[in-house]
Amino acid sequence: MPDLAFFVIMAAKIIVVFGLMLLSVTYLTWLERKLIGHMQVRYGPMRVGPHGLLQPIADGLKLMFKEDIIPEAADRKLYLMAPALALVPAFISFAVIPFGNQVRLFGRTIDLVITDINVGLLYLFGVTSLGVYGIVLGGWASNNKYALLGGLRSAAQMISYELSLGLSVVGVVMLSGSLSLVEIVNAQSTVWFVVLQPIGFLIFLICATAETNRAPFDLPEAETELVAGFHVEYSSMKFAMYFIAEYANMITVAALATTLFLGGWRGPVLPSVVWFLIKLFLFIFLFIWLRATLPRFRYDQLMRFGWKVLLPAALANIVITAGFVALR
Amino acid sequence: MTATVPLQAYLILSAALFTIGVIGVLIRRNALIIFMAIELMLNAVNLSFVAFSRFLDSMDGQVIVFFVMAVAAAEVALGLAIIIALYRNKESVNVDEINLLRG
Amino acid sequence: MEWVVFIPLAAMALATAVSVVLLRNPIYCALSLIGTFFALSGLYLLLQAQFIAMVQVIIYAGAIMVLFLFVIMLLDLGHEPSPWPRRDRPRLLLSVVLVLLLLLELTVAIRPGISKAIRGPYTSAVVDAVGNTQLVGRLLFTDFLIPFEITSIILLIAIIGAMVLARRHLG
């Protein structure tokens, strides 16, 4: 039986990570609006607080006070449960990601990962595949044709790209010999996997953008398409929960990309957590940059790309990597 | 009670889940729910395999469960395609109404 | 100590399984089945089969049930009529009684010491040293290579078959 200190440390880690994630998600909205604004030669939010820093708080208050409408013929239990079903996987997927090297506090060595399970990567894939349910059930429970179609399209997109996402990571698993994220980070002590697996990295980034329904793959939920997709009947806090889930997913996928390809928290001079945050911010900046720059894929182009281009490329990557590993 | 759960507990749970699946297949008339009950039966058997794998110090059970899952996935894809084709023809998934070959 | 985890998981598995069979809305049945899969995944973790537990969530709860939900939503089946229509009642009761007899027989057959199976080499210590996934992978590519290859063909057949069966015939 582990002692009390173990539970206290675990609780502290969970609170810190969870709190930071919630804070980051709110300020990610601000960051996105500012960055897209500057990329479009305008300022973005400037009025609410200095440089619009209080904008997320204003948005949060607005959403909380908005009228909460539930359609009469909607399936109430599912309608209320669906945003939570979208939110929970986005947050619990951070449980296995190592965000720093070991630290010594109060005479104990603490690993900066909430829990290191030996099938950490599979756990992450299981949890991301559960994110589909929030969207599908939200679309269904709204009792609205357009919401249902939007939800089904979004779900089909997610499960198609999930496949290539999983396959693109097999090369990393082969090189590091383990599914545990802590060991994958440790295996990158000499060279980062982005150098050894460039194709895998590229496929992973594309699939991650599609998986989180971010531009240019955000057709199922864009405001101008199909009456805003599966969340058309949602208002106020439930609508906010869907968007928190999307941003949290984006953070998780960026964290996964840094852990698998960019060496996680490894880096000279600066403390490990700072390096992790720098690399995380790099990927989030990349996602926001993609949104500001690229036009949207049409749905059939999206599906064709996922199945006919990315899947064969990921399979070829596996074969080539396996050849190299076998001949080493 | 002993500290660890004995093999019999897992096997009885597996038997109970299996019989619930059988009752589902016998009672329900909706083809999709019958299919779900069949999946329940497959999972009950998976539980037996994994329990034996642990208590007999062998990994064979887990490998066989892997194959069962792969085959179950293939079976679900084909079964649902058949149900869709059936629905297109008869506008119903009630197995009582699929009686064209009845003598 | 293990009982503290086993009893709630087993209760959840049984409760959700019974809901699958008794509920009348197909969507709720599918969601109950997902609950059963989660309970089973927890039991696999208790049995130290971590790879199979995660694969269960990924494949069953994450892919197969999504497929089920797609079909239920697209076919737009409403609530079922009662599964206990009056004229069918004798037949249904007889089937339930027979199945309960099956359960009784299975429970009696599982007496301690009834199986004289041979114990294998992979004790918990060995599995912890090498790694659960590594051992499953090793077995898949050595002892179980032929079933592995045949499974890939089965999956290919399933893909082609599903596409052919569900295709709309034009003209």
Image: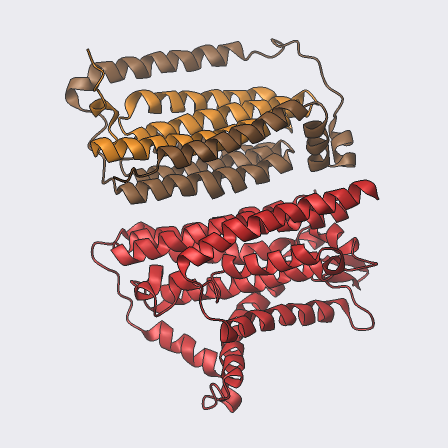
Chain colours: A red, B orange, C brown
C143 left or right, relative to C159:
right
Residue C150, image x and y in percent?
59, 25
Residue at 41 percent of width and 41 percent of height: C67
B81 left or right, relative to B10:
left
Q: Residue furthest front?
A: C171
Quadrant location of residue A228?
bottom left
A190, A171: nearer the viewer: A171
Which quadrant, please, contains the N terminus of chain A?
top right
A97, C75: nearer the viewer: C75
Where C60 falls versus A207 (above or below)? above
Quadrant location of residue A266?
bottom right
Residue at 62 percent of width and 65 percent of height: A16
Quadrant location of residue A179?
top right
Residue at 67 percent of width and 49 percent of height: A317
C148, A87: nearer the viewer: C148
Can residue A236 be seen here? yes
Residue A100, image x and y in percent?
73, 63
Where A194 falls versus A277 (above or below)? above
A157 left or right, relative to B59:
left
Which quadrant, please, contains the C terminus of chain A?
top right
Residue A140, image x and y in percent?
31, 51
